[in-house]
Image (cartoon, rainbow, N blue to C red):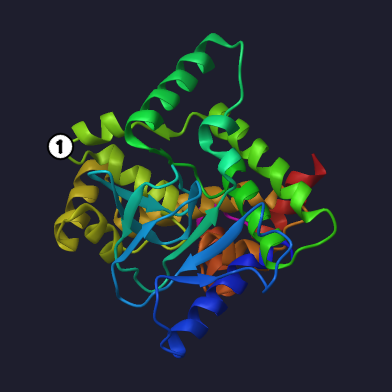
Amino acid sequence: MDIYHIGEALFQRQLAAKQQAIKGAWMTLAPSQSTLTPVVTAFFENEDSGVHRHCNARPTLLYAFAGTVLVDINGQHLTLTSGNLVFIAAQQAYRVLPLKPGDILTTLLLPVAHDLLTLLPATDNAQLKLQLSAIQQDYRRWHYAQFNNDKIEDPAYITERILCEVLCPAEFAATRVTHFFELLAIELLRLDNYLSPQLQRGKRQVTTADLLQYIDQDYDVCTLKAMAQAFHYNPNYLSNRLKSATGQSFIQLVDSRRMAAAMTLLANPHISIDEIVMYIGYSSKSFFYKKFKEWYGESPAQRRQAVLAK
C-alpha cells in the first residue's frame, strides 16, 4: 500500500465498523499475527458515539488523520486537527470524546524503549536545545506532548508511512518502522510545532489567529459547524467574526488554504491531479478545476506544466 491510498483504506474500515454497529473503543489496523506487534501495535478509534477511556501500558502516539478530535488528558482539553500528533507516556489515562463522521484518530502503541524522551535527539544547536529542554520538562510534568503539525508536513508524512507498513507489512517492515519513529522525533524538533501544556492551560480567549490556524491545519475537512463546535461558538457568530476580522468569508478562507496546498502539490509530478483533489478535500474534480481557474486564471494541468518546465 502507498501513502496516497491510506486514507481510503482507513475510511473504508471505519465505515465497515459503523455499518456493522461494532462496539468498543478501538478497531485494529494490523493483520492478525502481525510481525510488527513488538515494534508497533496500531488501532483506529471507533466512531460509535461513545466517550472512550484509555490507559495504555506502552507509550502511545495519537495521530489525527482527518477531522477534529477532542481529547482530555491530565486535566487538559486538547483539540487535534488533521496532521496533529500527541505522544502520551505509558500508564497515563486519557479520554477521547465522541467522534463525528469524517473524524479519524489512529493510535500507535510503541515499545517501552521508544518513549518520547528516548526518541528525541541530542543537539548542539542552542535554540533547539532550549526547545528540547522545554519539551522534556513538560513531558515529565504533564506526561504528554502535543505537536500541531500541518497535514502536508514531514511528521504527518512519516506517521502515515508507518501506518502503511502496519496495514501492509513488507520485507524489513520492523526495521523501517523503528527508524521512522527516530526520524519522526527529529522532524518534530526541527519544525518547532510543539504546543506547551502550560501555554495551553493559560489560554482564556480564542483569537483570530487561533481560528485561522484551525483552518490552516484542517482545511481538507473543515466545515463551519465543526469549527464552531471545536471552539464552542455559534456558527453564525463565528462566520461573522471571521468576516469582520479578515474581510473574507469562511468558505473563502478555506478555499484559499486549499488552493495554496494544491499549488504545493502540483510541483510534485508523482502526485496525480485526482490525488490532489482528494487530498485537499474537494469531492469533485470538475469543481476543483473551476475553483483553481477562478483563483489563478489557468487550469491545474497548465500550472503544473509551467512549474515543471522551469
The reply to whether the magenta stretch includes residue 163 is no
Q: Is residue 93 left or right of residue 235?
A: right
Residue that badge 1 annotates: 204
Label 1: state its secondary structure.
loop
Q: Residues within 10 Å of mark 1 (few under 14, many from 20)?
A: few
Place residue 251 in its image quadrant: bottom left
> What residue is at 76 percent from the left and 63 percent from the top?
169
Which one is nearer the viewer's eye here, 203 or 118?
A: 118
Q: In this view, does 34 lie to the left or right of 252?
A: right
Given the current orientation, which residue lies at the most extreme right position?
Answer: 171
Residue 65 visible at all: yes
- Above/below status of 14 relative to 165: below
Image quarter where the C terminus lies is top right
> What residue is at 40 percent from the left and 47 percent from the top?
91
Callout 1 amino acid:
Arg
Find the magenta span and give its range. 295-299
The secondary structure that dominates the magenta segment is loop
Residue 3 visible at all: no
